[in-house]
Image (cartoon, rainbow, N blue to C red):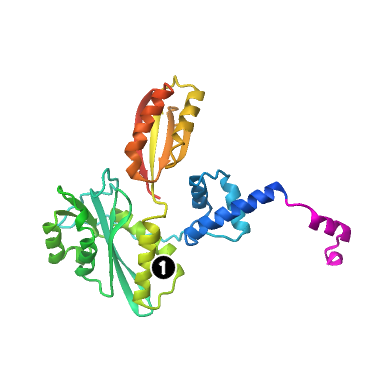
Amino acid sequence: MCTVLKVHPSGYYKWLKQPVSNLEEENNKLLEHIKSAYKESNGIYGYRNIHKDLKASNIHVNKKRVARLMKEAKLCGIGNYRRKPKYKAGSIHKAHPNHLKQCFISQTPNESWVSDITYIRTHEGWIYLAIILDLFSRKIIGWSTSHRITTDLIIQALKNTKYRIPKDGVILHSDQGSQYSSYEYKTFLKHHNITPSMSRRGNCYDNAVAESFFKTLKKELVRKTIFRTREEARDKIFEYIEMFYNSKRRHSYYQTDIYISLDASYSQVQEFIEDIRLNPEIYYAKFTFDNDDKPFISIRFYDSQISNIVDDEIQEISKKHNIEIISINKTLVIG
């Protein structure tokens, strides 16, 4: 072998006996954490989300290092596929107005829901999936499957959400499918204090959040799985929604931009960021300037339910470090 590789035997045996470097040991330990996070995501996450999982576990490494180790270990996430949707302005439905108007930000749970239906191929034929998604938590709160695409399909999904409906009602947004225009559907909504809302005809962007979920489902589950029976497909859908998407998967994130006074020193800002990062739910905190050269601190977190807690922490930490807050802007970034 030494002859083929054109190396001296003594050099080869010296290389065999040399100890493993500290860097290589660190990389091996880090790779074990990476493989664990990759397995937890069912082989879905790429290096960016793996890096976020490591950071959440208090393992701070460079994103490029994670990408390099994953490439060497041949761990690949599921990439996006691009398909430009056909779009036209479309007309408003005569029976139900568009209450959301592409405003997909909800301040409280069970304020606004979105719904849609998709189809999945199996060897037995098509299976249809209807979902109800809460715009506050971005989780699937109700779903049902059937071999027929009827009004009963969406009503069965809604029956799983009845206990969530508040006294003052909830908005349920959908497209203009015939199931959402039927008499049985409208009667069910009326009896359960649900206000119907509909997209414009042929406009997929009016129901973008539900469409985005189906894209994610098909990218992460359907496109890499062959379903022999409808029952097998339903079991896999249950496993994906209940065991992964609702409980583990990273979703859209909430961003809070804290505009501060120009009088704040750099050390004060750094101490503010260090304190806010002590909250394990906050995975990003950075000091920067906007287009008008106004200084602000940008923080990001995933769980909308901690928004009020974050607000309280911002006020406490700003008082602690004598930083004057000019304004606070909150946005939801769709992932």
**Residue 223 appears in the figure:** yes
Which residue: 48% across, 35% down?
286
Place of residue 322 in the rendered image (x, y in percent of width and height, measured from the top left): 42, 21
Magenta portion: prevailing SS class: helix
Residue 219, x across and y down, in percent: 43, 63
Up-down: is 10 above or below 331? Answer: below
| Element marked by disc 1 | helix
* Residues in magenta, as a range: 1-20
Who is closer to the viewer here, 254 or 315? 315
Q: How many circles with numbers are drawn on the protein?
A: 1
Residue 120, given in percent of the width and then of the height, sits at: 35, 71
Q: Looking at the image, is 78 positioned above or below residue 254?
A: below
Residue at horizontal 40 percent and vertical 26 percent from the top: 318
Specify whether residue 42 is painted magenta.
Answer: no
Task: Name which quarter of the figure residue 309 lies in.
Answer: top left
Q: Is residue 256 above or below residue 120?
A: above
Residue 247: where, in percent of width, then height? 38, 55
Image quarter (top left, top right, bottom left or bottom right) of the N terminus: bottom right
In the visual, does 159 lie left or right of 43?
Answer: left
* Visible residue check, residue 291: no
Residue at image position (43%, 27%) is 294
Q: Is residue 95 left or right of residue 335?
A: left
Looking at this rendering, what residue extends furthest in the top direction? 263
Amino acid at the residue labelled 1: Val
Q: 10 Å neighbourhood of mark 1: few (<14), some, or many (≥20)?
A: some
Q: Seen in the image, is 174 located left or right of residue 85?
A: left
Name the residue at 43% across, 35% down: 298
Quarter-of-image position of residue 82: bottom left
Quadrant assignment, res 173: bottom left
Where does label 1 land, which residue? Answer: 222
